[in-house]
């Protein structure tokens, strides 16, 4: 006999209580963290449309990109929540959380700053509340729960006004399309200004840069592609710089305490599944840690494109306070290795390119996507310069918000 696990369906009483709590909220938000399911985007965005709630969608949630309604999807929160004046005025009264803890530190600090808001977590058997901040955990499948909530709210005629101001009406109003002056409209306006500022600032990077790798890939990846990312900076830059798009792109990553290990092998395993062309963006140290995983591509004829962001060490540590301890920083945290990865590509029979300009990068990615084998594209960057570029982007966002009267205070 074979036992098959069935998804946990929310009980009718749970749905009614949860729907009442959501309908009573005047400033609710939906936070979608990393989530392994494949069918969340449609139900959760439909729920957001009924309630007039913004959806803060981590790329790993599967909600940021796709053919579903994305009018309530907020993709630039990591940029504009860094501005204290913005984070302070966007005080929610209810947070509906789905999936694991979000990647974005500014988002986590925002939720911490507004800890008085009621947090409800949809958690199907995992443990996605390590901070013990959820007031209620609904132990049911998030996708099925969102569908049940939509059916209940539509059945009772509970919908937000077009202005997204927390009022209720019957009929067919959809707050998610508001772009008005209410709660949802405020988030949409902030998102629009911040995303434009990010794209303009990153677009000004004429030299190869880590942030622009992701804005370039947003244009280069075809519908149905898989973008696998390493931990540390790649997964964070994905969150900040990859916009919501009407393309079906699946984002994958190994999150956890040992996330630097096994990323190459995991990505090649995903590529072997053959769902679509796969691009892996990985840091040099993580690539080095699982270098022998490349043998699988050679042995089994796996097609994949690996973008190695080589800043000669651990780039994330340059953003942390220990970067000021210059005497021992490089030895203990920077850990430069001086490796030239073209030799690793030759060892495993992979195509190799090291572009010097963005046109070369685009050409290399397109060749990799068209190749039936393994391609490695090495992007050389500088860790100190990378910190400067990120901070320039954050300042550009603050200045753009201030120019529209949407921000106050300084960027943290």
Image: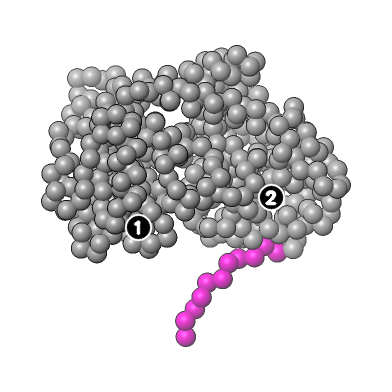
Q: Is residue 314 visible?
A: no
Q: Which percent across, then down, holds residue 101?
A: 50, 44
Residue drawn at point x = 51 percent, y = 31 percent: 78
Task: Tell me the SS state at disc 1.
Answer: helix
The answer to which of 242 and 54 lies nearer the viewer is: 242
Q: Which percent across, then down, holds residue 322?
A: 30, 24
Q: Which percent across, then down, holds residue 50?
A: 75, 46
Q: Is residue 59 in the magenta section? A: no
Q: Which mark is residue 271?
A: 1
Q: Which mark is in front, 1 or 2?
A: 1
Pointer 2: what residue?
A: 46
The answer to which of 24 and 403 lies nearer the viewer is: 403
Residue drawn at point x = 17 percent, y = 41 percent: 341
Tell me how far mark 1 sits from mark 2, CA to CA.
31 Å
Disc nearer the start of the sequence (1/2): 2
Q: Quadrant of residue 184?
A: top right
The answer to which of 146 and 268 lies nearer the viewer is: 268
In this picture, which residue range is highlighted in magenta?
1-11
Q: Which percent across, then down, holds residue 288?
A: 21, 44
Asked if residue 251 is positioned above or below residue 316 in the image, the reply reads below
Q: Is residue 8 in the magenta section? A: yes
Other residues around mark 1 within 10 Å, as few (<14) / some (14–19) / many (≥20): many
């Amino acid at each position: 006999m074979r036992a098959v696990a069935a998804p946990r369906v929310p009980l009718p009483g749970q749905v009614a209580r949860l729907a009442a709590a959501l309908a009573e909220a005047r400033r609710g938000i939906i936070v979608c963290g990393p989530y392994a399911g494949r069918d969340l985007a449609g139900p959760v965005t439909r729920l957001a449309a009924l309630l007039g709630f913004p959806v803060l969608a981590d790329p790993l949630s599967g909600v940021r990109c796709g053919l579903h309604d994305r009018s309530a999807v907020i993709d630039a929160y990591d940029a504009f929540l860094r501005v204290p004046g913005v984070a302070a005025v966007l005080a929610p009264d209810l947070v509906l959380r789905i999936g694991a803890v979000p990647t974005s530190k500014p988002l986590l600090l925002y939720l911490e700053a507004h800890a008085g808001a009621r947090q409800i977590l949809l958690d199907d058997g995992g443990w996605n509340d390590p901070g013990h901040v959820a007031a209620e955990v609904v132990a049911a499948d998030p996708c099925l729960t969102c569908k049940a909530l939509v059916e209940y709210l539509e059945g009772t005629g509970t919908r937000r006004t077009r202005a997204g101001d927390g009022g209720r009406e019957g009929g067919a109003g959809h707050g998610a399309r508001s772009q008005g002056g209410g709660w949802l409209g405020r988030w949409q306006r902030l998102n629009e200004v911040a995303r434009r500022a990010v794209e303009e600032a990153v677009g000004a990077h004429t030299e190869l840069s880590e942030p622009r790798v992701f804005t370039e890939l947003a244009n280069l990846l075809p519908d149905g592609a898989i973008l696998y990312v390493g931990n540390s900076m790649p997964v964070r830059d994905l969150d900040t710089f990859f916009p919501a798009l009407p393309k079906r792109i699946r984002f994958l990553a190994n999150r956890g305490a040992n996330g630097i290990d096994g990323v190459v092998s995991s990505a090649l395993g995903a590529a072997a599944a053959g769902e679509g062309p796969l691009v892996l963006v990985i840091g040099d140290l993580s690539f080095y840690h699982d270098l022998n995983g490349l043998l699988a591509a050679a042995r089994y004829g796996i097609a994949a494109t690996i973008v190695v962001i080589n800043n000669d060490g651990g780039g994330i540590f340059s953003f942390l306070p220990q970067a000021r301890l210059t005497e021992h920083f490089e030895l203990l945290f920077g850990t430069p290795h001086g490796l030239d990865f073209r030799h690793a590509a030759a060892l495993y029979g992979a195509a190799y390119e090291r572009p010097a300009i963005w046109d070369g990068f685009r050409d290399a990615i397109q060749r990799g996507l068209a190749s039936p084998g393994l391609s490695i594209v090495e992007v050389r960057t500088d860790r100190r310069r990378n910190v400067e570029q990120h901070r320039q982007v954050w300042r550009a966002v603050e200045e753009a918000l201030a120019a529209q009267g949407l921000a106050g205070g300084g960027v943290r």
